[in-house]
Image (tube, helix red, strand yellow):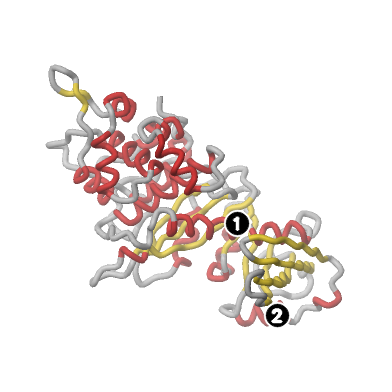
């Protein structure tokens, strides 16, 4: 059954062949319609395509998606697959209530998989969670979503973390359907678990770069006690941007024979960051320890530093969803609505990134100038 287990699952998980289908309409056709057969006026794929095109045009809510659909011309509705009715063949767009009903009922795991990117052959894959703060109700906490994102801000998939549990319970379930052979998986300290590392290397044939903090006190103390002052393999980098100047030093140490108790670990790295705020002159220091199964011949200090920084890509996606799409301010709470809207926002970001837009806000403005043609062209609708 579907990997989404926070609520009742509505469909089976899509297969690799279904996820790899060339056309987005063909991929979405895999999802089972959750509505009763009686009274259906609009095809499920047509409604989902409407939402997929409205969000890159700037729609951030059910109401906005419905307004975009209501103003769409007949040729746009024809490309979306909205059926013609009556003797004149007029196409009537799905209403906002229809869009809301479908997005709250449709399988969120299947939707996220089918709108995501294929990680096979990628260099890195970052895993991190985000809370949709506005989805909190008096009876339930806010929806917590665990996502996997490729370099460049393209989302692979996401799952909702069940209430009263943590992201750790969904790590393997999130990544299980995908081919990760040779991919380096990065995450924050929450997912630095022996079972996760063993599963990635032994079952998925992947690699890992994991952060170690004080939530793993024994491992953290063991890393701190390593002879870092004697390390000769090191890398220094300097850069300026975002109102600050930063200097980073990366030292790596082969720990295969040093008795570090962690599955398949081959190297440890000590990353020290020295930051200066260019406006206030405030200086901050930060030291981070990471471990990886990559040997020294495959991962130099420079590469380890790059892999560790790739985790920032998923944080950038979450930041864009908050600031550009106002996700935390969204009051969508019912059913699968929070997950489905988050998937649509991530899909819009991936689509704009693939089209070459470095800034999502500027990309949304450009799409908004031709809102009924540009989004459809971006996602490849004929």
Residue 250: image x %, image y %?
Answer: 76, 67
Q: Nearer the viewer, residue 220 or 361?
A: 361
Q: Secondary structure at mark 1?
A: strand
Residue at point 20%, 43% (across, down):
98
Residue 22: image x %, image y %?
Answer: 47, 30
Residue 93 in which image quadrant: top left
Mark number displayed over residue 284: none
Label 1 with label 2: CB-CB less than 8 Å:
no
Residue at point 22%, 37% (across, down):
94
Mark 2 Cα shell of 10 Å, populated few (<14), some (14-19), many (≥20): few
Q: Is residue 29 left or right of residue 90?
A: right
Residue 62 seen from this side: yes
Q: Nearer the viewer, residue 64 or 120?
A: 64
Residue 273: image x %, image y %?
Answer: 70, 71
Mark 1 Cα shell of 10 Å, populated few (<14), some (14-19), many (≥20): many
Q: Nearer the viewer, residue 375 or 365?
A: 365
Residue 258 in which image quadrant: bottom right
Number of on-image labels: 2
Instruction: Quickly name the residue at label 1.
Output: 185
As drawn, the residue found furthest toward the front would be: 279
- Which image quarter holds the C terminus? top left
Instruction: Quickly name the residue at label 2.
Output: 222
Find the distance from the CA under tag 1 to the CA under tag 2. 23 Å
Q: Is residue 369 left or right of residue 301?
A: left
Which circle's residue, 1 or 2, is located before the other in the chain?
Answer: 1
Q: Nearer the viewer, residue 86 or 120?
A: 86
Q: Secondary structure at mark 2?
A: helix
Residue at point 43%, 42% (across, down):
115
Compared to 219, does 80 lie above or below? Answer: above
Compared to 81, does 334 lie above or below? Answer: below
Residue 284 seen from this side: no
Residue 34: image x %, image y %?
Answer: 23, 44
């Amino acid at each position: 059954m579907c990997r989404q287990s926070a609520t009742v699952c509505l469909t089976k998980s899509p297969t690799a062949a279904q996820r790899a289908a060339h056309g987005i309409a063909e991929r979405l056709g895999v999802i089972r319609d959750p509505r009763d057969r009686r009274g259906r006026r609009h095809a499920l794929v047509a409604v989902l395509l409407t939402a997929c095109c409205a969000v890159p045009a700037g729609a951030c809510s059910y109401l906005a998606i419905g307004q975009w659909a209501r103003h769409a011309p007949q040729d746009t509705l024809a490309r979306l697959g909205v059926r013609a009715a009556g003797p004149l063949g007029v196409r009537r767009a799905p209403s906002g209530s229809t869009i809301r009903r479908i997005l709250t009922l449709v399988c969120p795991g299947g939707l996220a998989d089918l709108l995501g990117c294929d990680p096979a052959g990628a260099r890195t894959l970052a895993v991190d969670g985000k809370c949709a703060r506005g989805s909190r109700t008096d009876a339930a906490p806010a929806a917590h979503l665990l996502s996997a994102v490729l370099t460049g801000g393209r989302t692979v998939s996401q799952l909702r973390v069940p209430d009263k549990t943590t992201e750790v319970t969904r790590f393997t379930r999130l990544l299980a359907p995908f081919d990760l052979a040779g991919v380096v998986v990065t995450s924050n300290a929450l997912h630095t678990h022996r079972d996760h590392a063993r599963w990635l290397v032994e079952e998925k044939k992947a690699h890992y770069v994991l952060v170690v903090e004080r939530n793993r006190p024994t491992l953290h103390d063991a890393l701190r006690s390593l002879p870092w002052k004697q390390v000769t393999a090191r890398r220094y980098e300097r850069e300026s941007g975002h109102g600050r100047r930063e200097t980073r030093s990366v030292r790596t140490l082969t720990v295969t024979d040093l008795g570090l108790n962690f599955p398949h670990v081959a190297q440890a790295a000590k990353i020290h960051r020295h930051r200066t705020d260019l406006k206030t002159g405030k200086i901050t220091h930060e030291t981070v320890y990471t471990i990886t199964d990559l040997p020294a011949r495959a991962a130099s200090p420079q590469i380890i530093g790059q892999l560790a920084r790739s985790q920032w890509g998923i944080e950038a996606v979450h930041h864009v969803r908050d600031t550009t799409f106002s996700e935390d301010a969204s009051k969508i709470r019912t059913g699968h609505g929070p997950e489905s809207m988050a998937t649509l926002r991530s899909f819009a970001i991936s689509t704009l990134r693939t089209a070459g837009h470095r800034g999502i806000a500027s990309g949304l403005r450009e799409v908004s100038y031709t809102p009924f043609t540009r989004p459809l062209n971006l996602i490849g609708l004929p």
